[in-house]
Image: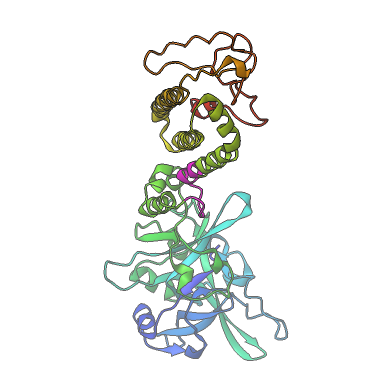
Amino acid sequence: MCGRSRCSLGEEQVARAAGTSRWADRQLYRPSHNVAPGAATPVVRVASDGERQVQSMRWGLVPSFTKKDEKPDFWRMYNARSESVAEKPSFRRLVPTRRCLVLTQGFYEWQKEKGGAKQPYYIQLASPEGGEEEPLVMAGLWDVWDGPEGPMHTYTILTCDSSKRLEWLHDRMPVILRTREAQETWLQPGDNLGKLLHMCVPYNGEDLVWHPVTKQMNSPSFQGPECCKEVKKPSAKDFFKPRSAVAASPKVKEQGKLEFNQEPGKAGSSQRDQQGQQAQQAQQAAIKDEQGVKTEAGSAGLPAQTDVQQTAAAAAVNADEPPADRQQAAVATTAGRQAAANQAAEKQAAEAAPKQQEGQQGEPQAAAGASPASGQKRKQPAGSSASKGSGGSGGKKGSAPGSASKKARPAGQRPISHFFSKG
C-alpha cells in the first residue's frame, strides 16, 4: 500500500510545512510528480540538539544492521503496518527516538478492475479556492545505514486500515497527521507507545479527495505533471447515449449536405446518386432497344423518336420521383402516348386516300383506311384481290384493308408497359 507518492514542493513550501529552514542533504532532493521507493524526498526529524530539521532521505527503509557490502532493497520495507511496529525488530527499535514526518502532496493507489487491469487514482487534500495546495503530512520512521558510499538516511511510511470513504479503493492507507498538534506529538521523543498507536487511525476528513489518472504513471520513469492530472473515465451515460444526439450534430449535418449535393457519377453513396445512376441505366437500355422500338412504332403508325423519348422520360420519372408521385406520373405519360397515337393514325388515314385503278392492269388496289371525315371503312372495289398487297398492305384474306401486321418483338426487347410498372 502507498507504493507511489508525489512531492514537487519548493523550498519555501517545505520550510512552511516543516516549521524550519534547516535542511540537510538538500542536494539529494529532486522534485517529482511520481516518486517511487529509492528516491530522496524532504523529511522532518528532531536533530541532536533537540530542534527540528529537514533531512533529504531515501524512501524505503534500509535498517542500520544491513551489511555494508549488501545491495540495499528500497522496495522491501517502504511501508510499515502501525499495528505491528511494536513487534517487528526492524521497526520496534525506531519507535522511541526515530519518528519523522514525511512531506508529500499526495499519494497514488490502484483499483482492481475486471480482467486483472488496475486503474490508478491520485489522493490529495482539497486546495482552497484560489489558494495554494496544502502539503500532506504522513507519519514515518527513519534509520541510517553506513553503506559503501557513506551514511544513507532512509525512511518508511506507517499505514493503517482504510477509512470508510476510501475502502472502495483499497483496504489500507497511510497514517495522515492532519493537525499541527498531532505532528508535534509524533516528533517529540518519548516511549508512550499506547498514545502513539492511538494516533495511527484512518483519516476520514471530507477534504481528502481523489480522481483517476493516466495509467502511464504505472512506470516510475514516467514523470511530469501529467501523472496527477485527472482523466475522464467512460460512464454508463455515455455508453447509452442515443445515436440521434450524434446524428443531429452540426458536423454530421454538414457532411450530409455535401453528400446530397454531389453530382451523379462523382464519389459518394447518397440516395440521389443511386437514383440518378438508375435513371441513366434505364435510358441507356431504352436507346439500345431503339431499333426494335422504331419497327414497332412503324407498324403501329407512331413516330419512333416519340416512343424513345417517352420511354426515357418514364424511366427517369420512376427513378427520381418520390414513391407517392410515381403512379400519377405513369398515368400522365400513358395519356400523352395515347393522344399521340390517335393523331398519327388520323394523319396516316389522310395520306392513304382511296385510289381506284383499272381492273385490266391486274394489280390489286390498295385498300383505303378509315375516312378522316366519317371514320367509316370504304368498300373494296369489285374485282380487287385482298390476298395480294402492294406498298406494304399485304394483309391476309379477311383482314381489314390498310391495317399493318405487327412483327414479332426482337429477342431481349422489353414491352413499353415494363417502364410504367408500379413500385
Which quarter of the rendered picture does the N terminus lie within? bottom right
- Image mark count: 0
Residue at the extreme left: 130
Q: What residue appears at the point 44 percent right and 38 percent down from the top-left corner?
A: 320
Q: Is residue 404 above or below residue 126?
A: above
Q: Nearer the viewer, residue 55 or 8?
A: 8
Q: Position of residue 363 (x, y in %)?
A: 62, 19
Most foreground residue, 364 or 45: 364
391 relative to 129, above or below: above
Q: Is residue 319 visible?
A: yes
Q: Extreme right residue here? A: 69
- The magenta span reads 264-276
Which quadrant of the view contains residue 340? Answer: top left
Give the residue displayed 53% in from the left and 63% down from the top.
82
Residue 61 counted in the magenta span: no
Which residue is located at x 60 percent, y 8 percent?
398
Question: Does residue 203 lie above or below 29 as drawn?
Answer: above
Q: Give percent across and percent down for residue 71.
A: 70, 81
In terms of depth relative to the viewer, which is nearer, 299 or 359? 359
Given residues 294 and 181, the one toward you in this image is: 294
Name, please, the residue furthest toward the front. 360
Left or right, residue 19 beside residue 380 = left
| Residue 3 in sight | no
The coloring applied to the image is rainbow
Q: Where is residue 143 shown, x and y percent of the image?
A: 57, 79
Q: Position of residue 149 (x, y in %)?
A: 64, 91
